[in-house]
Amino acid sequence: MTDWTDASAAEFLRHLFAQAVEASKPEARIAPLLPPPPEGRILVLGAGKAAVGMARAVEAHYADAPRLSGLVITRHGQGEPALGRIAVREAAHPVPDAAGLAATEELLALTHGLGPEDLVIALISGGASALMVAPLAGLTLADKVELNRALLASGATISEMNCLRRHLSRVKGGRLAAACAPARVLALLVSDVPGDDPAVIASGPCHGDATTAADAQAVLARLGLDLPRIAAALASPEAESVKPGDPRLARVESHIVCSPQMALEAAAEAARAAGVTAHILGDALEGEAREAGRLMAGIARQVVLRDQPFARPCLLLSGGETTVSIRGPAGVGGRNVEFLLAYLLAARDLPGWALAADTDGVDGGAEVAGAVGGAAVLHAAGRDPAEALAGHDAHSFFAAAGAQLVTGPTGTNVNDFRAILLP
């Protein structure tokens, strides 16, 4: 297809996003990874935006196993339909709440009394860091909420956030798996982090942590966060996480069920099936969202003007997780729409269209996945796009322009999805 219009290009990019999300749903990938029923119990523990779907697949696989039970924690509004033998609890994301604290205490209590004949299936997906909240002794939920809010506004990378979280929790940084010892632990992970490191996904509840409490203190200092109670907790011996090689982790096995790369490959395949040449630029792009948008505009400009590094027509795909450092008052925004608005401003004189969205259906401060459109969108909102970008108000801008991408909860999360169509 070569005669693109604004409408047909937007429809095409939405289709690619739908294919990426569908490929990121873990249910169909679970069964081949599950072992035969053990002699003892099967205990399912999990958290994240894909936790309920994953647990449903486990229940179906072990339908005849008599000793199956467990608990998973998901985001408010995503716990239906209910499961059978696995309890579902709902909690807040991205800022933890009292429901998440109570659910995590309930989850940890289920690990008591496990033996070597038991099997624990840990179902971990994006969002679990906020949903599984169990502060170190001496810290409160209010302390963790204050930290989360500060991190979300600081521009911290996902690695920095997770480093801090692993050293301030009784469940992250390998502590969940350690609590399950001596049982066998099978960790099934939906990756939402650059590089798919199991120790980083959801702050690694089932994996040894090579970073130290001193590393976490350094992150706090670099970000300039004045949080005395957090600093004091990091200085305590209890802040040290479970390290790789700890004997309590000897029976842990893990598998990446879905990842950002899988989503990008599915979108690329769908594009090629439609006759569009697709190029995956990377599944781990990080940095400030608006700077990433401007950088991608520079790449698009080189393609348009020089046919380098790719000839037109083509599609540029990327994933990962950008960040937003909030400076001053902020409107309703998110990292994907901030990326897109910055891209469109920098590429306003170029042909083409772009989409940027979060695969979980929620981008930043709105129940909106992202947005899609070309240069015409910049004039459709009836307001200054540069002003909206400066005020971190991209969701409001794209809503006024009629360019939002609204999916509702998708049941998965492999982080950001970005597609740029250059005719």
Image (tube, helix red, strand yellow):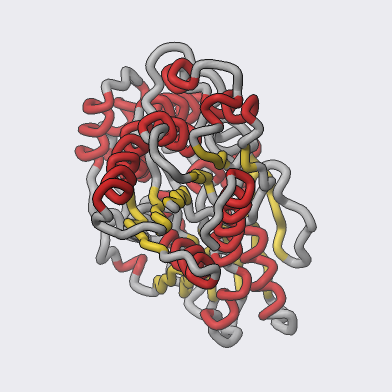
Q: Is residue 337 visible?
A: yes
Q: Is residue 200 left or right of residue 408?
A: left
Looking at the picture, how far across and down is residue 322, in whole percent?
Answer: 38, 40
Q: Is residue 167 left or right of residue 330?
A: left
Q: Is residue 94 above or below residue 74?
A: above
Q: Is residue 164 above or below residue 223?
A: below
Q: Residue at x 42, y 51 (%)?
A: 422
Looking at the picture, how far across and down is residue 284, in whole percent?
Answer: 33, 53
Q: Residue at x 40, y 21 (%)?
A: 326
Q: Residue at x 40, y 52 (%)?
A: 319
In which quarter of the view is residue 159 placed?
top left
Q: Is residue 167 visible?
A: no
Looking at the picture, how far across and down is residue 191, in whole percent?
Answer: 44, 59
Q: Is residue 160 above or below residue 283?
A: above
Q: Is residue 360 left or right of residue 144?
A: right
Foreground pick, 242 / 274: 274
Foreground pick, 348 / 16: 348
Q: Residue furthest top?
A: 328
Looking at the picture, how far across and down is residue 243, in whole percent?
Answer: 27, 57
Q: Is residue 282 above or below residue 137?
A: below
In which quarter of the view is residue 100 placed?
top right
Foreground pick, 72 / 57: 57
Q: Which corner quadrant holds the N terminus?
A: bottom right
Q: Is residue 84 left or right of residue 348?
A: right
In which quarter of the view is residue 101 placed?
top right
Foreground pick, 377 / 21: 377
Q: How many marks?
A: 0
Q: Residue at x 63, y 46 (%)?
A: 7
